[in-house]
Image: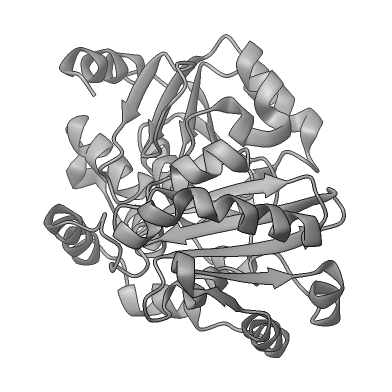
Amino acid sequence: MTKDAIKNIKQLLETPKQIVIVPHKNPDGDAIGSTLGLYHYLLKHNHIATVIAPNDYPDFLKWMPEESKVLKYDSQKEQSDNLINNADVIFTLDFNALNRAGDMEDVLATSKAVKIMIDHHQQPDSYATYMYSDVSMSSTCEMVYHFIDMLGNKDQIDSDISSCLYAGIMTDTGSFRFPSTTSKTHLVVADLIDKGANHSDIHNHIFDTNSYERMQLLGCALTNLKVLPEYRTAYITLSQDELNQFKFKKGDTEGFVNYALSLNNIIFAAIFIEDSQNNIIKISLRSKGNFSVNEFSRAHFEGGGHTNAAGGKSDLDLKLTIENFISILPSYKNALNNA
């Protein structure tokens, strides 16, 4: 972000404003952590701030300070539209194209508020008045930390802000093991711990709250695991019937795809999850090395993300989606074997 942009934002935020903060649809730890972290910071400056999520998110994220005040657009549309239409400033966090906000896209696009994007995904759209975009960053939460620092207010980061930002950095770096984790990331995390983030409690909240049904669903997913050694690829499927059998709740399949990626000599992994309510197959893609699942998803599954982590969807049924996926792989055989 340029010095002029930071100067303008500082001036903009010098007096109390009506502010809306928006994460992407189906928000994850980085999306909720960054929006709530920024929310707590803005309250310190007497702004009237509201986080509006496009829809609900997993229970393991609902321990964060003031999470109960987050509005859900899909069930609180009238109140949310009011706030968006009357906002002076709208922050969009952890996404860089308005269609990633789901049903909020139109009202965000027509809002006359100053829009500020903070995001680390590739190929951003140009809808924002001010854009802080950096694909080298581990997470949007790390970027929010640097954003507050650029505004000259790092000393105002307290335990609530630290806890939210730590959670997002931890989840988006795969507990600090993904290549996007840098020495600077560790310095940020160290400062957040010093400022009050209880790393042990946060890890327990997110990773150690499994239900019996989720463990059974994981067992089902691993039973469905298939390996395509000639393409160094593995994939998992979960049908709607299987989700129903094990009482699926939002967030239950988080991290499942990483089990496929952990296999020896596998550098490309996918999970295909049937969503009969929306009549689509949800797809999560992961990779190692320089094989870009962002480019793969954009080219074939109407998605995108990062080089090593991306999402997408298919309008075909589960069987045809898998057949289509497998039919695409020969075109990438050299890239996969040389990754």
Q: How many marks?
A: 0
**Vertical relation: 259 (above or below) 56:** below
* Residue under the image location 45 percent in, 72 percent down: 261
Q: 64 above or below 313? A: below
- Is 23 or 299 nearer to us in this picture? 299
Find residue 276 and report its image quarter. Answer: bottom right
Locate residue 67 relative to residue 266 in the image: left or right.
right
Q: Quadrant of the N terminus?
A: top left
Q: Residue at x 41, y 60 (%)?
A: 287
* Residue occupying the point 69% across, 35% down: 102
Residue located at (43% from left, 26% from top): 124
Q: Position of residue 266 (x, y in %)?
A: 41, 72
**Quadrant housing the C terminus:** bottom left
Q: How is the image coloured?
A: one colour
- Which x, y percent locates residue 33? 45, 53
Query: Does residue 110 appear to the left or right of 197 in the view shown?
Result: right
Extreme residue toward the top, this view: 112
Instruction: In this rendered view, identify the residue nearer to me: 61 or 236.
Output: 236
Q: In the picture shown, does residue 200 fall above or below 284?
A: below
The image shows residue 13 at horizontal and vertical percentages of 35, 21
> Nearest the camera: 171 or 39?
171
Residue 23 showing in the rendered view:
no
**Residue 158, can we see it?**
yes
273 shown above or below 104: below
Q: Quadrant of residue 80?
A: top right
Residue 158 in the image, given as x and y percentages of width and height: 29, 54
